[in-house]
Image (cartoon, rainbow, N blue to C red):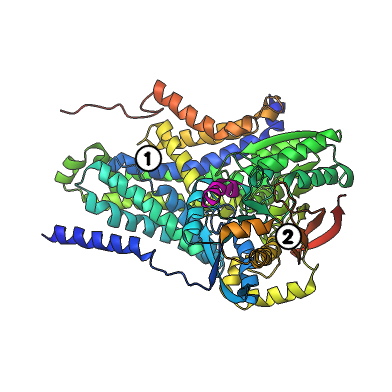
Amino acid sequence: MADFFHQNLSYFLSGISVGGQYALIAIGYTMVYGILRLINFAHGDVFMCAGLMMVYFSSSLPFAISIPAVLLLTLLLGFVIERVAYKPLRSAPRMSVMISAIGVSYLLQNAALYFTGGLAKVYPEIPFLSRSVQIWGATTRVVTLVTPVLTVVLVVLLTLLIKHTKIGMAMRAVSRDFETSQLMGIKINRVISMTFMLGSILAAVASLLYFTNYASVTPTSGAMPGLKAFVAAVFGGIGSIPGAVIGAFIIGICENIIKGGASIFGIPGSGWTTFSDAFTFAFLIIVLIVRPTGLFGEKSVDKV
Amino acid sequence: MRKTVLSLVIAIVACAMVFAGGSSESDSTVVKIGVFEPASGDNGAGGKQETLGIQYANSLTPTVMIGDTEYTVELVLADNESSNDRAASAAATLVNAGASVVLGSYGSGVSIAGSDTFRVAGVPAIGITCTNPQVTEGNSHYFRICYLDPFQGTVLANYAYNELGARKVYCLAKLGDDYSGGLVNYFVEQFTSLGGEVVSETFPDGNSDFTSYIANAKNSGCEVFFSPVSTEAAQLIINQSDSQGLGMPILAGDTWDSNVILQAALGKNADITVTTFYPEGADPEFDAAFKEWVNADSTRLANNGGDDTISAVTAMGYDAYYFALQAIQNAGSTDPADIMDALWTTEIDGVTGHIALDDVNGDAIRNTVYVKHANTTTGGWDALPAVVVD
């Protein structure tokens, strides 16, 4: 058993690290869904924008300034998107808000296409994170080891915030019942803005970790990670934060096991790698058939 | 009331946008050459460099003599976004703009996808660096001035077997990509017939995590990593092969001959060898003049990837332009049908060598492949001896 892990360590490391990055993005999806019942399609593109900002900032500023600046500006971007594209539609049918979200997603992608001229931008090497390390015979980057730890720390902090602060209590109230909490004097717009800002800043952290490993940013870089994170959120039960995190880790690890299938299971030339993405989405379908609400999803209660 | 007015205004603006496109009158002494190249997507970087070669040639020779009349050459650009499903509409844009002949595209997949539009319209197209045989096979309107993948794949396989001494090679292509899939296929054919062994895998579109593929290559005991994929994926592969400690030479085809690769490999632990159409330094006059032209304008410099390294595709784009001009001159007309007839017998001496087409598919008759090795300390290419096949 130990031998098996030793030989295939690099696949598991990749899986855990990419899973952590999906988790940070998935939290943004799941929190917004929990409160607004909205699937924020622009979230993957916010993640991509954070990556591009870093490319541009780091070319002229030291990391000590550019990293906080990226976090701050991404937070601001999330806030602005909510205010401009979603708030005016608060009383509109849910479908309109979703279409608006798709619109924002394309707007961000095309704005990025305009600014970058369509070429892939090379992500800067962040000195500490990009260093190569050897662990137990596998070579990898520091960021691979940092990601799962950082993800868990951030999730614990987020859970504390939701459980033990006033704004967290307000969030829980809003997600339970939108209208009643409004009647009870909760400033609903503040709570929603806060949710979007939290989601965006986590996406910015995810972009730092993700692009340090996969160092090229294009206007569509956010699409695939965004989609996988969304799958993770649905898989874990959309609306549930621990569900999203566990779902993301499962998807990240499974994806890499499939990619390494030939080597892990000793079936050479089986062409498994071709199906790594197909597997992810087929997995989602199966889970939804067996448990329609996902792993940790809330039971739907019909209110009269 | 306000709403009605608003809808009316939106409708008018929308109509204005639609009609704004179709107002240009065609001048009688203008001949239009369509440039069918990607400016965005996976192959955006390469497409821009190829376009630069065409634009540079156009800046030197902006006119062509047809009979006794001097015609001005107008380049019409259309971005096919490196995407097979956008290629047809980009091709239609060029046909509708009245292009007499089309150059491009970088990337075999988009060339094949756009081919039918050109065939129906009767417009001849000249492939510049699309190496997949299917581009010209079985049709009479698509021509090509570069060598083909069966040839390139064979040369690469021989190189891996004889020069690098490899007996087991890891091949990685992109799923559904005509270029990398085709080249890997020809490579595998030749390499196995030499007595070597291959492990062949594909990665899906939009994938940026290559660590598991690199681990597969290491675990399966391969000695060479062959991955003739787009430059965008190449950046990631180089980067991750360094951090994962790949520890074997990387071999690739003509797409990797780009400064994007050099920039990615700079300072990394990477051993990269590529085959290509033109080595920088083969024609010092062309090199110097082109560098001056690129450095004179910041947009050109950005389109060339931020420095003045000369890509083979740029030299090929330059030759393609002159090849098209020669064909127009030989045809003595701006009519696409006349040019199509004239192309079969057109010949020129370009910077990348003598160009003449065979009479079967309209493919270039070439027998030389240049080989380059990336220097990770200077960030330039080191030329290796060229391979000439009889």
Q: Decide: few, some or many residues near mark 1? Use Cα within 10 Å; few <14, some 14-19, many ≥20.
A: many
Principal secondary structure, stretch drawn in magenta = helix
Secondary structure under tag 2 reads loop
Secondary structure under tag 1 reads helix
Q: Which residues are magenta?
A: B109-121
The tag on residue A172 is none
The tag on residue A30 is 1
Q: Where residue B239 appears, x then y in whole percent?
A: 67, 52
The tag on residue B267 is 2
Q: Decide: few, some or many residues near mark 2? Use Cα within 10 Å; few <14, some 14-19, many ≥20.
A: some
User: Which one is nearer the viewer's eye here, B335 or B293?
Assistant: B335
**Residue drawn where x is 51% and y is 34% of the image:** A251
Q: Where residue B360 appears, x then y in whole percent?
A: 72, 46
Look at the image and tell me in which quarter the N terminus of chain B lies.
bottom left
| Separation of marks 1 and 2 at Cα, in angstroms | 41 Å
Is A74 covered by the magenta stretch?
no
